[in-house]
Amino acid sequence: MSTSNDNVNFIPDIFRSLLAITIGILLSKYTNFSFNFQIPIIAFGVVTTMKKFSIKIFFSNYWWISFFAALGLLFTEIFRENILAFAVVTFAVFFSCFFFSYRHPNGIRSSILGYSFTTIYATYSDKVVENMVVDIVLVTVLGGIIGWILLLIFPTKEENLGVKKSQREDIDKDIFHIFKITIIVFALWLAYMFFDIRDTFFAYATLAGIYTNLNLEKIHKLSFLNITIHSLGCFLAIIFSFFINGISNNPFIFAFALMVFIYPMVYIGYYGKTPFQKIFFFGLIRAIILPICLYLTPYGDIVTKASTRALQITIILIFSMFLTRFLLFIEGGTNE
């Protein structure tokens, strides 16, 4: 049970997190970078996982998306005229990511996101993917700078960190099992390469990230959890857009409204009585950040785009739940 002294100790942590989210979203709204939503997400991640800023830890946690985005661009240029070779190389990249996901699960999720982003969007002539890769690097650096400055201004105590680095469960690195997981994500990647469905890219990215867990039972449960988190996140972002409609062009009002709106979730994230509450509400914050960064304009709500995003994620994850249940049924309902 928290004491009043504990509550006082958490005040700078809550305020630091609110500032990381708010400043990051403001930068994303008043700049035109691709992947601008990464600015508040990275800043928020830095201030909730580091006692003090470490450039080594920062690169270890956040360099993946930039490196694999560049790698995806490189392979796109090399194999642009040979789709078969491109497919083989991509399958090898995905298989390697899943095979080594037990070492850096969060990094591998970012790797698949970055690689898929550049390879898929490079198939569209209206996109300059080289600029997108540069933008990914820039938003990563900006998020890191925000986190670094806030950790300097508001030092943290290690025991107060809202998100602990979880221990990765031992997994059975069965080649055939990893092969099956790779086929699922690879098949979806092929669909995005051949059909104009890029508007649903982040639904694919959500699914691909969940599959880095490898355990089919866990994937099945996480699919439902992510439906809940992303649907609720989009709904709350829509509610926020109604309140801020017409006045979000004023950065001071926008910043104040964001801090008031996000505060209850940050509060529960730090004071949650169970680890699940903390994980859920910090996940919910990230789910709210994306539609606000991607869709919110000064003079309009985001009902259509945010609800479409929630629907897309729900559909693809329901498909995932049926698929994982079917695979578990074939395996006899167990996943050793």
Image (tube, rainbow, N blue to C red):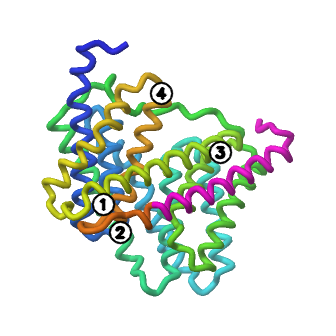
Magenta-colored stretch includes residue 11: no
Q: CA distance from mark 4 to mark 1?
A: 30 Å
| Residue placed under numbered mark 2 in the picture | 34
> Which residue is rendered at x = 71% and y = 39% of the image?
172
Q: CA distance from mark 2 to mark 1?
A: 8 Å
Q: Main secondary structure of the magenta part?
A: helix
Where 187 falls versus 47 (above or below)? below
Q: Which quadrant of the figure contains the C terminus?
A: top right
> Which residue is rendered at x = 31% and y = 58% of the image?
241
Camera-side residue of 229 and 209: 229
Q: Amino acid at mark 3?
A: Ile
Disc sitting over residue 139 in the figure: 1
- Evaluate if marks 1 and 3 touch, with contact meaning CB atoms under 8 Å apart: no
Q: Amino acid at mark 1?
A: Val
- Evaluate if marks 2 and 1 touch, with contact meaning CB atoms under 8 Å apart: yes
Q: CA distance from mark 3 to mark 2?
A: 29 Å
Magenta-colored stretch includes residue 309: yes
* Residue 95 location (% of width, % of height): 65, 57
Q: Which residues are magenta?
A: 307-336
Q: Amino acid at mark 4?
A: Pro
> Which of disc 4 and disc 3 is earlier in sequence?
3
Mark 4 Cα within 10 Å, few/some/many (few <14, many 20+)? Answer: some
Q: Which quadrant of the figure contains the N terminus?
A: top left
Q: CA distance from mark 4 to mark 2?
A: 33 Å
- Evaluate if marks 4 and 1 touch, with contact meaning CB atoms under 8 Å apart: no
Q: Is residue 112 visible?
A: no
| Residue placed under numbered mark 4 in the picture | 275
